[in-house]
Amino acid sequence: MNSALLLATAEGGVQWGDFLFYLCTFLILIALVKHFAWGPVTEMMEKRANKIANDIDSAENARKKAEELAAKRESALKDSHVEASKIIDRAKKNGEQQKATIVNSAQEEVSTLKKNAKKDIEQERQEALSNVKNDVAALSVEIASKIIQKELSAKDQEALVDSYIEGLGKQDGIR
């Protein structure tokens, strides 16, 4: 087409009819390309640019959220370590308190048992002394009545026994 235009100009003049036809055809072709091809291609390119921009924004937001989540997890981990050490400290203190309580109650129980044992021993000792005194008194009366060969009256027996018991008590106090 261009070669025909160049040949026509070279031959002696421009053919204005052909030139106008070519010009109109070119303008119609540009309009058709703009309407059917340029608009959809531009729209497609804008959609693609928007999608890429949205993807970049989404990736940035996801990165920020991941950083925030990592910071929260790190903080929670530190808090859990602090809480765990507090729990361990409380458990140690409770253990020490329970230990002290158990030791004190055991010492009190031992002390009470010692006191009760001493009381029981003293009571048994007193009962044994009383039984011995009674047995000695009875034997003394029996021996005395055989030696004297007479029967003592109840008053005389009682006086004899009391004096003998006093003598035993004084000897027991000396030991």
Image (cartoon, rainbow, N blue to C red):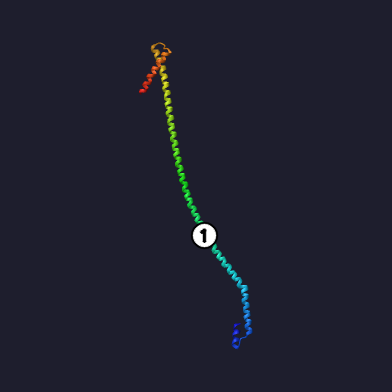
The quadrant in which the N terminus is found is bottom right
Q: Residue at x 60, y 84 (%)?
A: 5
Residue 112 x %, y % = 44, 32
2 left or right of 85 in image: right
From the viewer's perspective, tell me whether residue 159 is left or right of residue 65: left
x, y percentage for residue 113? Answer: 44, 31
Reply above or below: 83 against 175. Answer: below
Quarter in which the C terminus is drawn: top left
For the point 52% across and 60% down, which residue is it?
A: 64
Query: In which quadrant of the rendered view does residue 3 lie?
Result: bottom right
Name of the residue lying farthest toward the bottom: 12
Q: How many marks?
A: 1
Disc 1 crowd rating (10 Å Cα; few below 14, some 14-19, many 20+) is: few
Quarter-wise, where is residue 149 in the image? top left
Q: From the viewer's perspective, is residue 104 above or below residue 138?
A: below
What secondary structure is found at the residue carrying circle 1?
helix
Amino acid at circle 1: Lys
Q: Residue 31: where, in percent of width, then height?
A: 62, 76
Name the residue rendered at 42%, 13% in the picture.
155
Above or below: residue 32 compared with residue 157: below
Residue assigned mark 1: 64
